[in-house]
Amino acid sequence: MNKNEGKGNVYYSRSILNNIILLAVEEVEGVAFKQKGQGGKRSVSSRPEVKIDFCKEGVFVDVSVVVKNDCSVPDLSFRIQENVKRAVESMTEFKVVEVNIAVLDVVFEEDEGKE
């Protein structure tokens, strides 16, 4: 995607926006990481999953996360949405139209960090 501001073009790759969003999500307390399956159980992704759609109005973001059991999901979702919007809009010239959050799983403290 590119933005034109008079003197030239600035191009943002999808992977750059993806990394900005991942960093913003990972900064939020309550998002869980590095849960691995044990004893034949399926493993859960260790990083949030991100989908980005571009349109004339701006950027639409879908984020899938695993959360810690000791947090409020509505509060956590709001903090993720605000952090993603702030990060993308301050580091790029894109306007974030919408940030959708999908909670894939809940991790209990004794499960977190097991590899």
Image (cartoon, rainbow, N blue to C red):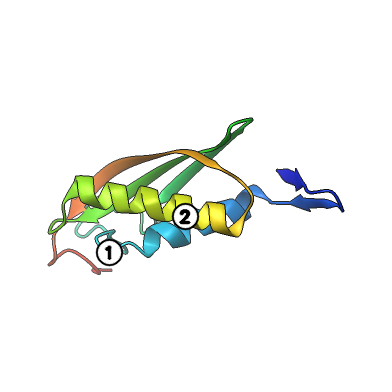
Residue drawn at point x = 25 percent, y = 52 percent: 76
Query: Which mark is drawn over residue 63?
Result: none
Looking at the rendered image, the quarter that the C terminus falls into is bottom left
Tell me, yes or no, if residue 85 can be seen here.
Answer: yes
Q: Secondary structure at mark 2?
A: helix
Q: Secondary structure at mark 1?
A: loop
The residue lying at 77 percent from left, 53 percent from top is 10
Q: Which residue is mark 2?
A: 86
Query: Count of labels shown?
Result: 2
Q: The disc labelled 2 sits on which kind of residue?
A: Arg
State the image quarter where residue 54 is shown.
top right
Q: Is 22 in front, or is 57?
A: 57
Q: Nearer the viewer, mark 2 or mark 1?
A: 2
Foreground pick, 108 / 57: 57
Mark 2 crowdedness (10 Å alpha carbons): few <14, some 14-19, many ≥20: some
Q: Assess disc 1: are there few (<14), some (14-19) or many (≥20) residues with their C-alpha within 10 Å of its C-alpha.
A: few
Decide: is 109 above or below 42. below
Q: Residue furthest front?
A: 6
Closer to the chain start, of discs 2 and 1, is: 1
Q: CA distance from mark 2 to mark 1?
A: 16 Å
**Residue at the extreme top:** 56
Tell me, yes or no, whether the two marked residues, 2 and 1, touch with CB atoms within 8 Å: no
Say which amino acid is labelled 1: Glu
Q: Residue at x 75, y 51 (%)?
A: 11
Front one among 43 and 69: 69
Q: Position of residue 23 (x, y in %)?
A: 46, 62
Counting from the top left corner in percent of width and height, residue 9 is at: 82, 50
- For image coordinates 23% across by 68% down, the residue present is 114
Q: Which residue is mark 1?
A: 29
Can residue 44 be seen? no
